[in-house]
Amino acid sequence: MTRKYPVASMKPAIFALALLAACAQTAPIPPQPDLPADDPRQAELLFSECTIYFAAVTRLTADGRPVSGDPTRGCPPEAAAIAVDINPMVSVPSVTPGYPQTLYDRMIARGIPTDLADGISKSKAFWDMVAKRDSLLVGF
């Protein structure tokens, strides 16, 4: 049986598919379903969430760890300039169903390693983000 396409000629196609798969693995940050899509609070929440992603990438880089995917995809570059504390706090609530779990799941989906996401979920930045979202939705 002869092959119509030699394996060597398929290497560029395989490489291109792998590259596309790597680029597509980072999900966009979805808008807050409780707010209209054009509400300015959407941008405020996106910006706050992105500061956490930039801090996570900075931590991974400082620790010499690889960054999987592109955790900051779709984030405004200005969010990188905002310092947030992603160090675990001493006493924190556990991640609960609802928005805290959604935010945690998004960190994992965007390529932040589980051990770092676990620490971030115990951080001031994480719980400030949860509180900010809750305060922006009050009265909506």
Image (cartoon, helix red, strand yellow):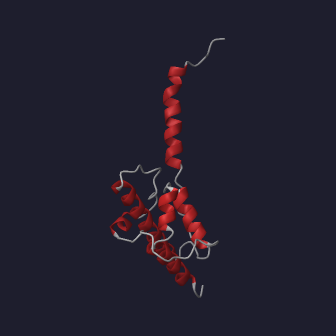
Instruction: Relative to 123, say whether 110 is above or below.
Output: above
- Residue 75 placed where, x, y %? 44, 62
Number of numbered discs overlaid on the protein picture? 0
Q: Looking at this rendering, what residue extends furthest in the top direction?
A: 1
Tell me the residue at 44%/63% (across/down): 53
In this rendering, position of residue 99 left or right of residue 82: right
Q: From where the camera sits, is residue 28 visible? A: no
Picture coordinates of residue 103, whole percent (x, y): 55, 67
Relative to residue 140, is residue 69 drawn left or right?
left
Tell me the quadrant of the picture where the C terminus can be found: bottom right
Residue lying furthest bottom in this view?
A: 139
Q: Residue furthest front?
A: 90
Q: Is residue 91 above or below residue 104?
A: below
> Horizontally, is 27 left or right of 55 in the view?
right
Q: Quadrant of residue 34?
A: bottom right
Nearer to us in this view, 118 or 75: 118
83 or 14: nearer the viewer:
83
* Picture residue at 35% right of the left edge, 70% below the top: 82
- Work out whether residue 9 can be spotted: yes
For the N terminus, give its image quadrant.
top right
x then y, percent, for residue 30: 56, 64
Looking at the image, the residue that sits furthest to the right is 1
Horizontally, residue 127 falls left or right of residue 54, namely: right
Residue at the (39%, 64%) spot, across then down: 55
